Image (tube, rainbow, N blue to C red):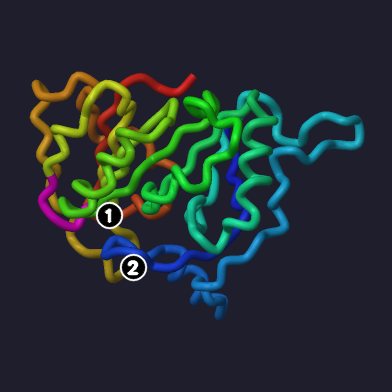
Amino acid sequence: MSVSWNPWHGCRKLSEGCRHCYVYRQDAQHDKDSREVRRTTAFNLPVRRTRDGRYKVPPGEMVYTCFTSDFLVEEADAWRAEAWEMIRIRSDLRFFFITKRIDRLMQVLPPDWGGGYENLAVGCTVENQAMADYRLPLLLDAPLRHKLVICAPLLGPLDIARYLVPGIEEVSVGGESGNEARPRHPLRFPPNRCTACQRRAPLPHPPPVPAFAGPQGRDRLQGKAMR
């Protein structure tokens, strides 16, 4: 089972992969400005309780976090400490967020971070070779218990074999969504050069990331799953 948690909404476009952002497209249908980052009414969802004192989000759920923004976006700096605390408190849940701002992670970690929270997985998004070569070394060096590589939207030829070291638990590959979606390019992945992942494609069911629902299909390279 899974739930979505969007503590804030909105984001600034950062790189070429943001051009046809599905959040901007959806907000435009309701005359909303996606550039405005705002705290949502669901901010404290993980720690909300029922009248009898139980958490509304039951233990064991996967919590897809901040999928209408970026968890590390600068405009949310004032709220992030509270969000980290909720993730820490709910160690009985599994949280997952993806980011294009992995270069900000070390600036905004909580004081008790240590080697990372066991109940959190972070996916680093790369859309081309330049972004992979910039972001993935930062991901590899980051103190995270669970690391994923999200190649979506894949806008150019990409070779990330040298980054697929033990510790990378999954690589997802996908295209853009929407009428203006650009073609998805191939991912160069020599299986004998990766000890962390095994090829599994295509997926039997769509992944829970709307931006991956591009017309060119998707693949997933998967190692161990987060427990």
**Mark 1 vs mark 2, CA separation in Å:** 9 Å
**Up/down of 47 relative to 130, above or below:** above
76 left or right of 73 in image = right
User: Which residue is denoted by mark 1 in the rendering?
Assistant: 153
Q: What is the three-letter code of the residue carrying label 2?
A: His
Residue 56 makes an appearance in the image = yes
Please state the extent of the stretch shown in magenta in the rendering.
154-158
Residue 45 included in the magenta stretch of the image: no
Q: Secondary structure at mark 2?
A: loop
Residue at numbered disc 2: 20
Amino acid of disc 1: Pro
Task: Give coordinates of residue 65: x percent, y percent.
Answer: 54, 45
Residue 170 horizontal/vertical position (percent): 32, 30
Residue at position x 31%, y 69% in the image: 19
| Image point (25%, 39%), residue name | 137
> In the image, is 49 to the left or to the right of 32?
right
Q: Earlier in the sequence, mark 1 or mark 2?
A: 2
Q: Are marks 1 and 2 in contact (CB under 8 Å)?
A: yes
